[in-house]
Image (spheres, grey):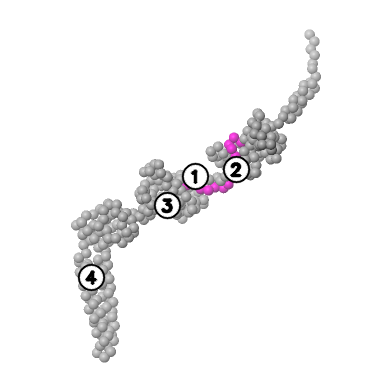
């Protein structure tokens, strides 16, 4: 049997012809504009609510309770008398001090008249003046003792449950009640030190509490601790929530959500990201040519990718028709309407 060999050159010519035909085909792609968005950071933390002002009321002296002028839940104004302790002895001391002061003032007046005639020496007048001042101090002390038997509201607020009853003898260690100014509720929570430099007082937060599962409360950062906790590596942060309808209570738990504004980066659809031996890249169309642009991924969010690359919002990134692209290849952007206003065509694979 005799074998005949076909020239290899024939096959090579055929291959070259096919390749030239392939290059002559239009490469159509679909693009989307590159967007510039900020790399916002969302942080959530559990916090506890506390009233704008909150104190526990204790008596200044040991005495018997005469009257209680409030009940749980009462809203009171600053300075209102809440509890009256027995002050009969102190009232008598005030009256006695007033009498002594009046007597000292009368003696001073007589001495001042007599000194003009030389009936008394000037030193007696000076002693009489000192006696008047001593009497005034004694009267002030007696009035202070009377005031200490009145327990007053230190600020506008809402009172808790009374812890004492009339006739009960109290001491400075006896709790009378709690009072809260809850027109504003503070929520304290810890923020990682990595976000500390980004926190500002104008930052806003949203908060949710199990007491109102369908409500969202809005607040703002009001204060930051002066230092980072070296054990937890966090900074204590305080937000304030307006409580105009008095629906919130001190001690409630809150899940706080804080959004910190980040740097701006080019943003492209996730499907446009390609991978090669030297890392990730995208294809953009500049003029009518495909350009391969290396990228570094910063963050992913909702189908988009924030990248670091030499692109901006004037570029168009290829999202379909990626498989046939080569650097500086002539392409047709299929989703760009023609000048005649004809409809866009679908890309060919």
What secondary structure is marked by label 3? strand
Q: Quick check: 125 left or right of 349?
A: left
Residue 240 — which label?
3
Check the image and report above or below for 94 versus 77: below
295 w.r.t. 153: above or below: above
Q: Badge 4 is on which residue?
A: 94
Task: Give how far apart the Cα atoms at labels 3 and 4 are.
Answer: 46 Å
Q: Residue at x 67, y 31 (%)?
A: 324
- Answer whether residue 57 is visible to the viewer in this image: yes
Which numbered mark, 4 or 2, is in the foreground of this view? 2
Residue 128 percent coordinates (x, y): 26, 81
* Residue 226 counted in the magenta span: no
Q: Secondary structure at mark 2?
A: strand
Lower sequence index among marks 4 and 1: 1
Q: Is residue 320 above or below residue 69?
A: above
Marks 3, 2: nearer the viewer = 2
**Which one is nearer the viewer's eye here, 44 or 31?**
31
Q: Which quadrant: the C terminus?
A: top right
Looking at the image, which residue is at 46% across and 48% down? 205
**Image quarter hosting the N terminus:** top right
Checking the image for residue 42, the label placed there is 1
Residue occupying image coordinates x 47% and y 50%: 204
Task: State the residue in front, 97 or 228.
Answer: 97
Mark 4 closeness class: few <14, some 14–19, many ≥20 residues within 10 Å: many
The image quadrant that residue 308 belongs to is top right
Query: Which residue is identified by label 2?
Result: 35
Of callouts 2 and 1, the N-terminal one: 2
Q: Residue placed at 77% from the left, 21% from the top?
A: 11
Gap between marks 1 and 3, in whole Å?
19 Å
Q: Earlier in the sequence, mark 3 or mark 2?
A: 2
Q: Nearer the viewer, mark 3 or mark 4?
A: 3
Read off the magenta span.
258-272
């Amino acid at each position: 049997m005799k074998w005949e060999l076909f020239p290899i050159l024939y096959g090579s010519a055929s291959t070259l012809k096919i390749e030239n035909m392939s290059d002559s085909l239009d490469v159509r792609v679909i693009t989307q504009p590159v967007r510039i968005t900020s790399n916002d950071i969302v942080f959530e933390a559990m916090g506890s609510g506390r009233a704008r002002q909150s104190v526990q009321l204790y008596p200044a002296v040991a005495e018997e309770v005469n009257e209680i002028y409030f009940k749980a839940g009462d809203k009171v104004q600053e300075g209102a008398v809440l509890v009256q302790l027995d002050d009969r002895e102190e009232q008598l001391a005030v009256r006695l001090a007033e009498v002594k002061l009046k007597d000292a003032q009368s003696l001073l007046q007589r001495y001042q008249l007599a000194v003009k005639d030389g009936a008394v020496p000037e030193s007696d007048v000076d002693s009489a003046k000192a006696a008047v001042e001593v009497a005034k101090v004694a009267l002030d002390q007696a009035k202070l003792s009377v005031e200490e038997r009145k327990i007053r509201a230190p600020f506008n607020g809402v009172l808790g449950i009374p812890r004492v009853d009339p006739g009960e003898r109290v001491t400075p260690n006896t709790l009378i009640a709690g009072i809260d100014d809850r027109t504003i509720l503070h929520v304290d929570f810890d923020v990682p030190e990595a976000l500390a430099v980004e926190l500002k007082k104008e930052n806003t937060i949203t908060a949710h509490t199990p007491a109102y599962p369908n409500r969202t409360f809005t607040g703002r950062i009001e204060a930051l601790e002066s230092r980072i906790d070296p054990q937890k590596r966090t900074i204590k942060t305080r937000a304030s929530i307006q409580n105009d309808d008095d629906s919130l209570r001190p001690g409630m738990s809150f899940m706080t959500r804080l959004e910190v504004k980040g740097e701006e980066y080019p943003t492209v659809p996730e499907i446009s990201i390609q991978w090669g031996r030297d890392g990730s890249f995208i294809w953009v169309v500049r003029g009518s040519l495909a350009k391969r642009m290396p990228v570094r991924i910063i963050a992913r969010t909702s189908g988009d990718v924030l990248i670091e690359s030499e692109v901006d919002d004037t570029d168009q990134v290829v999202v379909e028709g990626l498989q046939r692209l080569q650097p500086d290849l002539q392409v047709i952007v299929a989703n760009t309407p023609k000048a005649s206003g004809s409809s866009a065509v679908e890309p060919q694979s």
